[in-house]
Image: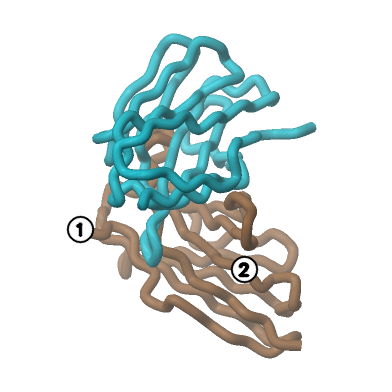
């Protein structure tokens, strides 16, 4: 039973345009969400997070939106750059819990075309 | 600052062989974790540790063992390798573990043939 789903295995976007990566979750107890970025032959690196008391969090070109009623979050990258080409994982957990309780999605491969 | 270091990067094992995946971190983090990632799947937690001398099972612990004798090191042991253990293994650490971001190593690609 996948509690965190990334239904798009891959996404291609033209450089300069917006990239939108989606993530759905089923566990209503999740109240903390993170996005990780992974380049080939490297480990995932933390990108941005959001807690359930917010519906939006921005960090430079990256914005995460949270729709609690739909149990859906999305990562927007504007403008997209070729260096953004990577696999993006969303993860969900509980703020009061521990990182051992993070549940990861299967990832979306983003390719930004020059 | 090296962060989280994993060795080896690649390994091929025969069925029934044993090996230890090494992980060390230099950030003085209390929490350390082992994940595995199978193709098309998310990362799944194998074992974790909240400090030296304390370890606990994650979601998929069968076939693995861990130890945590120091804050820095968290090796993962495979005793009798099976083809189902073919995967990419990631070690990670965090300071407190409370909803906090993880720092990952670069991974070990393991094939069991």
* Location of residue A79 (image quadrant): bottom right
Residue pushed farthest left? A1
Question: Where does the image place residue B10, in percent across and percent down from the top left?
Answer: 56, 47
Q: Closer to the N terminus: mark 1 or mark 2? A: 1
Count the marks.
2
The secondary element bearing badge 1 is classed as loop
The residue labelled by disc 2 is A86
Whether residue A107 is situated above or below residue A103 in the rendered picture = below
Q: Residue at x 26, y 53 (%)?
A: A28
Q: CA distance from mark 1 to mark 2?
A: 26 Å
Q: Residue at x 36, y 35 (%)?
A: B17
* Location of residue A114 (image quadrant): bottom right
Question: Where does the image place residue B94, in percent across and percent down from the top left?
Answer: 56, 31
The residue labelled by disc 1 is A1
Which chain is assigned cyan?
B
Whether residue A53 is situated above or below residue A15 in the rendered picture = above
- Please tell me the colour of chain A: brown
Q: Would residue A13 appear left or right of B89 to someone viewing this image?
A: right
Which sits in the foreground, B23 or B94?
B23
């Amino acid at each position: 039973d996948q509690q965190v789903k990334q239904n798009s295995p891959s996404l291609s976007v033209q450089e300069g345009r917006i990239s939108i990566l989606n993530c759905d979750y089923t566990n209503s107890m999740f109240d903390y969400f993170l996005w990780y970025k992974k380049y080939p032959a490297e480990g995932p690196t933390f990108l941005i997070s959001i807690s359930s008391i917010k519906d939006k969090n921005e960090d430079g070109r990256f914005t995460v939106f949270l729709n609690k009623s739909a149990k859906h979050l999305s990562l927007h990258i504007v403008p997209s750059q070729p260096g953004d080409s990577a696999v993006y994982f969303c993860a969900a957990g509980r703020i009061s819990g521990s990182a051992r309780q993070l549940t990861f999605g299967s990832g979306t491969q983003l390719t930004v075309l020059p | 600052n090296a962060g989280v270091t994993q060795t080896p990067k690649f390994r091929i094992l025969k069925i029934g062989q044993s090996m230890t995946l090494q992980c060390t971190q230099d950030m003085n983090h209390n929490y350390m974790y082992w994940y595995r990632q199978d193709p098309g799947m998310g990362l799944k937690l194998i074992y974790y540790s909240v400090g030296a001398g304390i370890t606990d099972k994650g979601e998929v612990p069968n076939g693995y063992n861990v130890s945590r004798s120091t804050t820095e090191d968290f090796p993962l042991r495979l005793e009798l390798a099976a083809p189902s253990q073919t995967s990419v293994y990631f070690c990670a650490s965090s300071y407190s573990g409370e909803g906090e971001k993880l720092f990952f190593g670069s991974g070990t690609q393991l094939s069991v043939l």
